[in-house]
Image (spheres, rainbow, N blue to C red):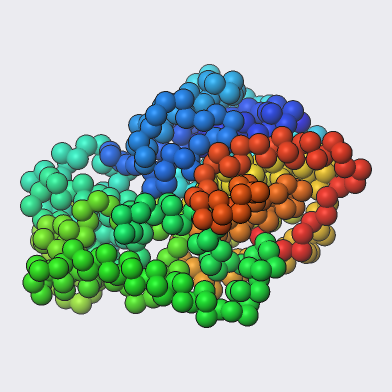
Amino acid sequence: MNIAIIGAGISGIAAASILNKAGHGTTLFEKSERPGGVWAVSYPGVSLQNTARQYTLTEFPWPFRPSLHPTGEEIMKYLEMAIEGLGLDVRRRTEVVGMVENNDGWTVRYRDESGTHEQQFDYVISAIGQYTEGKHRPVFPGQEAFAGGVITERDIGDPELFRGKRTVVVGFGKSAVDITVMASAQTGKVFHVFRTPRWMIPLTIFRIHYGRLLFSRLTTFFMPCWAHPSGLERFVHGRLGFLVDTFWYFLTRQVIFFCKLRGAFKGRAANTRLDTLIPEHELVRDLRSAAALTPRNYFRLVADARIEPVHGEISHFTGDALHLKDGRAISCDQVVLCVGSEKPRFPFLPEKYRSLLESEDDGVQLYRHVLHPDIPRFACAGYNHGFMHVPAAEIGAIWLCAYLNGDIRLPARAEMLRRMETTRDWKRKHINFEPSRSCAVNTRFQQYMDIMLLELGVSPYRKMPNLLAEIFVQYGAEDYRNILDEYLSGARERNAPLPSLPLDT
C-alpha cells in the first residue's frame, strides 16, 4: 500500500520503518522544519526519563554512544540519523490540512512553501503524538494586571530566564519538577505550587537504577492492568490480590523513605516541606504517562528550602503576587504554568470522524490502541504510549501490517467497541486523569506488548529459554529486534488468518 504518515516524531519514524520493511511505501508529512515531535519544541536541558536502551528503533540502533538518559539534543541527532539511515521519505515544512475519503482510500490535502496540493493514498496513519498540541494555559482572574510574566515550558529558551527572578512553577508533572530544579540553580528560591502532590519514581532504589527494577518481568507481573496475557497473571490478580497489594505497599514505603531521607538531621521545617510532597492516594494510580522521575537533587533542594513546595490552588493574580484559594499570597516576578498538554486533536480529518476521536476529555481510546472500527483506512501510531514506547509503537505497526495483509481476523464492530470501552472504563477507575489517559498503556507496557505479540503468533518471552533471565533481567528494545522477521516467517507458513484473542486492549 501507499501510506501517508502524519507526523515525523519517534512514533511516525518507527511506523514507517516497520511498514517499509514489510513491503509498503510510506510518506511522512512533518509540518515543522525539524522532525522529532515534542523533542523539537522541548525546554533546555530536557532528558529522557527512560534509558537509551529502551528508546531505540529495532531497525536502527543508536549509531553513537548516548547518555544513559539521552538529552533532547542527542535524541534529535539520533532521529535525524535514523531518517537518513533508513531512507525515509520525510516532507518537512509540510502540513496536512485535510483528508477526503474516496473508494480508493484518501485524498490528502497538504500545504507547503509552494502552496496547497493533493495526493492520493491507500491508507493514512496519524502519528501526531500526545504532547505536540499546545500547552494548557488557563487564564486566572487578575492575570492581566500581573506585572510579571506568565509562561509555559514552551516559552523557555534559556535557563537565564530565571536569573534573579522570584519564580513560581505550577504543576506536578515531569516538566514542572524539571523546571523547578532548573530555576533553583538561577535564583535564590523557587515556589513549587500544585493542587495535588504526585508520586515520583526515584532514579535509584538502594543504588539500583529504577529501570533494572521496573523493566523485569518480576515487577511487571504485579502491575494491575485491564487485561493480563497469561493464566498465571490472571489467577494472581484475580484470586491472590493480597500479594499484589503487598508488593505495591512495600514499593510505596521505599519511595517515601527515599523522600524523607533527604530531611534527616535537617530539622522539623525541612521534614514538613518533604511531607507536603507525599500524596494521599495510592502510588499505582499515578503510574501514567505523566509520571515523573524524581530530578536529581529535587528532594535535597526542598529540604534545604531552595524549593518551597506549596500545596494549594490558584485563585487570582494581583500586580505583584499569585494568590491561592486558601488566602495565601506569593510575591513573584514570574509564573511558569506546567499544567499539561491539550488533548490530541485531528483537524485534518472529516468532522464525522474527528468527533469520534476528540469527544472524550482523556483522549482517544482505540481498538488495540491502533485503530477505530468506524474510521476506514485510518490508524494511529504511538497511541500505545508507555514506558517501553518505541518497541510498543513498532509492535503496533506490525499488528497493523497483519491487519492490512488480511493475516488477522478482527472481531465484529460491536465487539471491538465493547473492548475499547472496557479498557477505557478500567483506566478511568484505576489511573488518575490526564488528557492522554485513554491513548496510552503507560506502565502496562509489558501486558500490552505480550498480548499483541501473542495475537501475532510471536512469542512474547524474548529471553527464553533462559528462565532466570526472563524473570529477573531488565528488558530492552534489543529484545524485540527480530519480531517483524518472526511474524513474516510465520505468516508465510499459515494457511488461514490468525484469530483475535479474547482479551481487552
Seen from the viewer's position, the closer of residues 332 and 189 is 189
Please determine whether, in this image, residue 396 is positioned above or below residue 208: above
Rendered-image quadrant of the C terminus? bottom right
Does the rendering let one see residue 317? Answer: no
Q: Is residue 347 left or right of residue 18?
A: left
**Would you say 28 lies left or right of 374 here?**
left
**Residue 238 seen in render:** yes
Q: Residue at x 18, y 63 (%)?
A: 262
From the top left corner, tell me how far across and down residue 193 is, in percent. 23, 63
Residue 412 is left or right of residue 340, and the answer is right
Please give the name of the residue rendered at 52% of the width and 76% of the height, measured from the top-left corner: 243
Vertical position of residue 401 compared to residue 151: above or below: above
**Numbered-mark total:** 0
State the image coordinates of residue 76 (x, y, percent, origin top left): 41, 31
Residue situated in front as seen by the camera: 495 or 319: 495
294 relative to 33 in the view: left or right? left
Quarter location, residue 479: top right
- Residue at 69% from the left image edge and 37% from the top image edge: 484
Quarter of the view holding residue 287: bottom left
Percent from the top left, x then y, of residue 387? 49, 51
Near-viewer residue (82 or 142):
82
